Amino acid sequence: MKISVCVNDVDCDLEVTANALLVDVIRDQLHLTGTHIGCDTSQCGACTVHLNCRAVKSCTVLAVQADGQSVTTIEGIGSPVALHPMQAAFKEHHALQCGFCTPGMIMRGIDLVNNSESLDPATIRAGLEGNICRCTGYQNIVKAMSHAALEMVSEKEMV
């Protein structure tokens, strides 16, 4: 099947099988390996990307469902020279250890900030349900997301 999808602001025409998962297409055809496959059961959230500006677990989305849609992966936010505020906050607050869950956590955190009225620690913890970190204990992840939320909201207010 042929699909057209905009990935990280680049239009892509792809040939996929009817049962291809979005995560596999992102990693294997587009070679964007920041999106991780952690569990194959949609439990861990390591594969979280944005589909039309909303966080989704890309292991639960068929590639054909993304036809005509916009996908943003971890590679599509920030840059090594200018980190996205969420990336910078994760770095500043030591919100990662092994880093495997980090791309999914960051993508989920951005979604939480963009789609929540307010982000207190309890709301962040509830919003992270379905994103698993086996290393950090979440405390620094919550701190990082709280800090990034302040930065992101300030940036929105300036625009």
Image: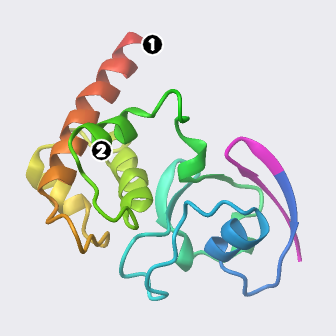
Magenta span:
1-11
Q: How is the image coloured?
A: rainbow
Residue 62 is marked as: none
Residue on which disc 2 sits: 90
Q: Is residue 53 above or below residue 14?
A: above
**Gap between marks 1 and 2, in whole Å?**
24 Å
- Quarter holding the N terminus? bottom right
Q: Earlier in the sequence, mark 1 or mark 2?
A: 2
Q: Is residue 82 left or right of residue 13?
A: left
Residue farthest toward the top in the current orientation of the protein: 158
- Give the x, y percent position of residue 134: 24, 75
Determine if residue 65 is in view: no
Q: Residue at x 66, y 79 (%)?
A: 21
Answer above or below: position of 5 versus 159: below
- Looking at the rendered structure, the secondary structure element under dot 2 is helix
Q: Inspect the image, locate mark 1, and give the three-letter code of the amino acid beneath it.
A: Val
**Residue 14 percent coordinates (x, y):** 86, 65
Q: Amino acid at mark 2?
A: Phe
Residues packed near mark 1 inside 10 Å, few (<14), some (14 to 19) or many (20 plus): few
Where residue 149 sits in the image (x, y, percent)?
26, 35
Q: Residues within 10 Å of mark 2 (few under 14, many from 20)?
A: many
Task: Say left or right for 133 vs 50.
Answer: left
Q: Give the main secondary structure of the magenta stretch.
A: strand
Which quadrant is home to the C terminus? top left
Position of 52 relative to 158 (above/below): below
Residue drawn at (54%, 64%) of the image: 35
Left or right relative to 152: residue 46: right
- In this rendering, the label closer to the viewer, 1 or 2: 2
- Asked if residue 4 is among those painted magenta in the image, a careful observer would answer yes
| Residue at the disc numbered 1 | 159
Residue at position x 61%, y 72% in the image? 23
